Amino acid sequence: MYVTQVTPMNTKLTLRLDEGRIEQAKRYAALTGKSVSRLVEDYFALLPSDDLAKTPQGVIEVTLTPRVRSMLGLLEGAYPNAEAARDDYRRYRETKYLEGASR
């Protein structure tokens, strides 16, 4: 179940977007029963907040949300032999792209 906090909107924001994107957003909003403003607000709520920082090397560091943190390590151990799985995938790609290109 997805729950979001409802807060009163009191600031106007003007966005300049491609007309096709606006129509796409309106259709999606109608299908989901939300306003376009609510879609934008929901998206903004997903953006990192004050935890965003830039390191001296120019790398942006973001503090992970609790939901993303809960997924860390989820697939750990999913492949008992990870090296063999990587080798299998490498062979698959070689077959697909190298042999397919020579046809």
Image (cartoon, rainbow, N blue to C red):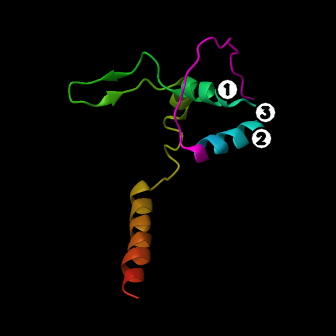
Residue 63 rendering spot, x and y as whole percentages: 43, 23
Give the residue displayed 68% in from the left and 16% down from the top: 5
Q: Quadrant of residue 38?
A: top right
Q: Position of residue 54 (x, y in %)?
A: 29, 24
Which sits in the foreground, 53 or 73? Answer: 53
Q: Is residue 89 left or right of residue 35?
A: left
Q: State the CA–CA distance, disc 3 to disc 1.
A: 10 Å
Which numbered tag is attached to residue 31? 2
**Magenta-highlighted residues:** 1-20
The answer to the question of whether label 2 and label 1 lie on touching residues, with beta carbons closer than 8 A, is: no
Residue closer to the observer: 51 or 93: 51
Screen quadrant of the C terminus = bottom left
- Is 46 left, or right, of 53 in this rendering? right
**Which quarter of the picture shows residue 56?**
top left
- Is the Cβ of the residue at disc 3 closer than 8 Å to that at disc 1? no
Q: Is residue 35 above or below residue 53?
A: below
